[in-house]
Image (spheres, grey):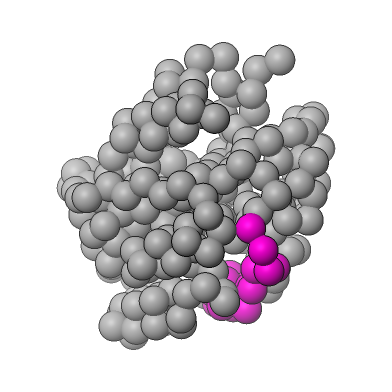
Amino acid sequence: MADTWILLRGLTREARHWGDFPNLLEQALPGSRVHPIDSPGNGRLCHEVSPTSVAAMMERARTALRNRGYAPPYNLLSLSLGSMIATAWAATYPHEVARSVLMNTSLRPYCPTHWRLRPRNLPALLWRLALGNDVAMERTILRLTSSTADAGVLPLWVDMRRQCPVSRRNALRQLLAAARYQVAAGPPLVPTLLLSGAQDQLVDPRCSVRIAEAWGVPLRTHPNAGHDLPLDDGRWVAAQIAAWIAGC
């Protein structure tokens, strides 16, 4: 049976923000099937109300997969807020998760608040959100999440926002869910790999270091990538996952 990989994005992002990365992952893991999914309030689900808890987001993801006919166990690959969902999933239903790869995440109690979202970035994000300017908002997000992205990414992201707009209410609800989430004590019950970008301008890379040390799990750090690792170097991400699986 082919391995099923479920891809979980972060705050206000949708399945299409993975770009061509799903294809890169399938090439690196022959026989695997990769399925990016949207969280309520984002992408195809932009008209739904975002939950204000990570646990509820996780339950919605489980229900969506069951409705699509995808049966566990799943391999979870996640970024930022998506990694909180993956962490909650592995802790609550470990029999449903074969392995988990967490990218540039931050978790209480391991990471202090000023590491989880760099304070200097919050005013810019809230101001852009208040203005409601699609181009300005996506330009700010791209600046904070990528260190190497091609300029052609911006118009694609603006089009995505205009096609599937994330409401201010849902953006704030997702931010609240991320801020409130606290991981259960102890290391994960499933094989786990952490990936981080050393040039992350949104979340301090020391968050991944702290989590890896607390859990005793491997951490691989890209020296030049930012927060959006699959955008900045998707081939590197896919190669790290393939090498980790081969060595397990």
**Residue at 48% from the left image edge and 27% from the top image edge:** 247
**Residue at 77% from the left image edge and 40% from the top image edge:** 96
Q: Which residues are magenta?
A: 171-187
Task: Compare residues 166 and 67 and report the one nearer the observer.
Answer: 67
Q: Eyeballing the image, is 46 above or below 106?
A: above
Left or right: 111, with 122 as reference point = right
**Residue at 64% from the left image edge and 28% from the top image edge:** 4
Q: Eyeballing the image, is 147 above or below 143?
A: above
Task: Compare residues 111 and 248 and report the one nearer the observer.
Answer: 248
Is residue 102 in the magenta section?
A: no
Residue 177 appears at what percent x and percent y?
62, 73
Number of numbered labels in the structure image: 0
Left or right: 9, with 208 as reference point = right
Task: Compare residues 223 and 50 and report the one nearer the observer.
Answer: 223
Residue 186 appears at what percent x and percent y?
67, 63
- The answer to whether any part of residue 14 appears in the image is no
Left or right: 197, with 148 as reference point = right
**Residue at 62% from the left image edge and 78% from the top image edge:** 180
Residue 48, picture quadrant: bottom right
Quadrant containing the C terminus in the rendered view: top right
Quadrant containing the N terminus in the rendered view: top right
- The answer to whether any part of residue 189 appears in the image is yes
Q: Eyeballing the image, is 29 above or below 93?
A: above
Left or right: 27, with 124 as reference point = right
Residue 53, picture quadrant: bottom right
Residue 138 appears at what percent x and percent y?
33, 61
